[in-house]
Structure formats: C-alpha cells, structure tokens
Amino acid sequence: MKSFSVSSPVRRYLGYSLAGAAVLFAGYLLYRTLSQYKWEEVVEAVTSVSLGRLLLAVAFTAASYLCLTGFDWLALRYAGRPLAYPRAALASFTSLSLGHNIGLAALSSGAIRYRFYSRWGLDAEEVAKVIVFCGFTVGLGLSVLGGTGLIANPELAKGVIGISPGVVYLIGGICLAWPAAYLLLAGLFGGRAMHIRGRRLEMPTVRLAIPQTIIGTLNFAFVAAALHQAISALAEVPYLEVATVYVSANVATLITHAPGGLGVIESVVLYLLPQAHLIGAVLVFRFVYFLLPLLMGSILLVLSEALLSRPEATETAS
C-alpha cells in the first residue's frame, strides 16, 4: 500500500501552519517580556553588565544548547534511528529554543521535533522514545547537579526550602542515588525491556546512559554559569550558590510549566540578592538564554519549512 507522503499538500499546509503559529507566538513572548520594562531600563540593564561577563554568559549559553543537541543525538540512538549530528542538532535547537519560551516543553518542543523527525523517516513511536529519553536526561542532570549543591551547601538549601539540614542531606542523597540506580539498571538490563506494573520500559545501554547522565548535568551546569555571570554584574556570589538555587527554581518551572521560567529567574536573583535591583541580571539572562535563541530558532524553523518541505529535499531524507 502506498504510504502517505510527507510532501502531500495537507501535511505541508499543517507544517506551515505549525511554523507560522510558533513564530507568531514567539513574537508575542518577545513582546510580552520586553513590554514590562521601559526602553531606558533595558538599555541601562544591558550596559551595566561588562562586555567580558556578557560574552561569558553567551559562551555558557552556547555550551548549554550544544549539550541539548547531544540529548537528541543520543536519544536517536536509543530509539534505534540514529541520524547525522547536523540533523539532530537542527531539530533539537529549533524545538528547544521555542519550547523553552512557550512552556509545556514536552508538548511544544515535542510537536516541532515530530515535524523534523517525521521528515527523516521516524514514526510517532520512535519520536516518543526520543522525547522520553530527553526527559530522562533533564531529570538526571537536575538530580546530579541539585544533589551535589544540596550536600555541598546544606545551609543555603535550608534557607531556600525551609527544612532542617538533616532532611537536606537526605534529599541530596536521594537526588544522587537515583542516577546511580539508573546507571546500574542500564548496566544490568541495557538493551532489554523491563516490565514495571504492566508497562514496558526499554533501558538504554550503559554506553548511552553514562554520556546521557554526564551531558544532562553539564547542560544545567552551563545554564547556571550563564546566570552566574549575569548576577555577578550586581555582586559577587559563589557559583555553587547560584547553581543550587537555580536548580530548585528549575524544578518549580517544570512543575508550573511557566513560559520561559517567568517569575522563576526573578525569584532566584531576589533570594540571592534581596537588596539588589533585579532588572539588570534578569534581563541580561533572559536575553542571552531565552530571547536570542528564540529569535534564531524562529528563523531556522521558517527556513526549514521553506527548504526541507520541498519534494526534492524529502526524497534525499534517510
């Protein structure tokens, strides 16, 4: 039976609609973020950060998004459908640069991922495996960095969470224990399916699970480093303090699905620097980590729809 071609008019129309809606929403998010501030405040906020710190924040942001492309590259191997790194990187950066701003990242970035990967031969189940693997990578990274921060700085964590140091150590130990258990299960059952309460779970091989854990941790370490550079423009704050509070705030973002972490970054800066004027650090970090990638991702999405949806482009997809 003849398959339904990805270049059919209906699917091309849906693809263009998805791209258009995403770009329009991206523009709205950009407007909503910047409209909270006066133009003079924006200029003052950006110019208050030294060029050196601004460049370091951009470099750490680039390193974070590079790690994120590794999420997809590894996930495609887990799904049994490896693609060339440039394709994985294109799908990852475009989907996540928009997903980070839109919120409900698993759905928003997942829809854009499916748009890319379906062109290159993956079916819905395989794309779902990619999304699940990337979700686990996020959890592993948050747990390792968060557990390290909690154990290394229990007093700060006590202030953030409002619990005793003993409980902080317990939570930190749990945060570090489950990635260790994950790696152990990958070593024991990697490449085979486990059945948990009637659900089938395929464990990645340990050769995938180890770099998955490392790259997930590095991603959040780089994000915290970018925020640290923005905050350091106001006052000297140790990196580990920024990382610990940021991971706690990021967990709140995942729970609330706040678009672009609205309110979360502000709470991090406010907690670390309660007497400081927040706008400088907040705006610089939002511009570097959210808005600049949002602009780039929107352009890439439009270009990909224009170039990759052509029949001659889909014929060469593998």
Image: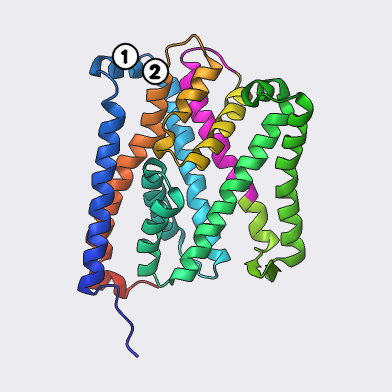
Q: Is residue 182 left or right of residue 127?
A: right
Q: Kindly identify which residue carries mark 1.
A: 44
Q: Quadrant of the C terminus?
A: bottom left
Which secondary structure is most common in the magenta stretch?
A: helix
Q: Nearer the viewer, residue 112 or 210?
A: 112
Q: Residue at x 59, y 41 (%)?
A: 218
Task: Give the quarter of the image for residue 191.
Answer: bottom right
Residue 125 is marked as none
Local packing at callout 1 (Cα closer than 10 Å; few below 14, some 14-19, many 20+) is few
Q: Amino acid at mark 1?
A: Glu
Q: Residue furthest top?
A: 275
Residue 29 x %, y % = 30, 37
State yes or no: residue 217 in magenta: yes
What span is in magenta? 213-237
Please name the residue shown 23% across and 58% down the image. Answer: 17
Q: Is residue 215 visible?
A: no
Check the image and report above or below for 190 versus 180.
below
The answer to which quarter of the image holds residue 208 is bottom right
- Residue 64's spot in the image, x, y percent? 49, 40
Residue 149 in view (yes/no): yes
Image vertical order of residue 12 relative to residue 48, above or below: below
Q: Secondary structure at mark 2?
A: helix
Residues under numbered marks 2 and 1 in contact, where contact means CB atoms less than 8 Å apart: yes
In the image, residue 260 sits, relative to residue 270, either above or below, namely below
Q: Is residue 7 left or right of residue 282?
A: left
Q: CA distance from mark 2 to mark 1?
A: 8 Å
Say which element carries label 1.
helix
> Residue flagged by tag 2: what amino acid is it?
Gly
**According to the image, what is the colour scheme of the structure?**
rainbow
> Which residue occupies the extreme bottom position in the image?
1
Residue at image mark 2: 280
Question: Looking at the picture, how far across and down is residue 309, in whole percent?
Answer: 25, 66
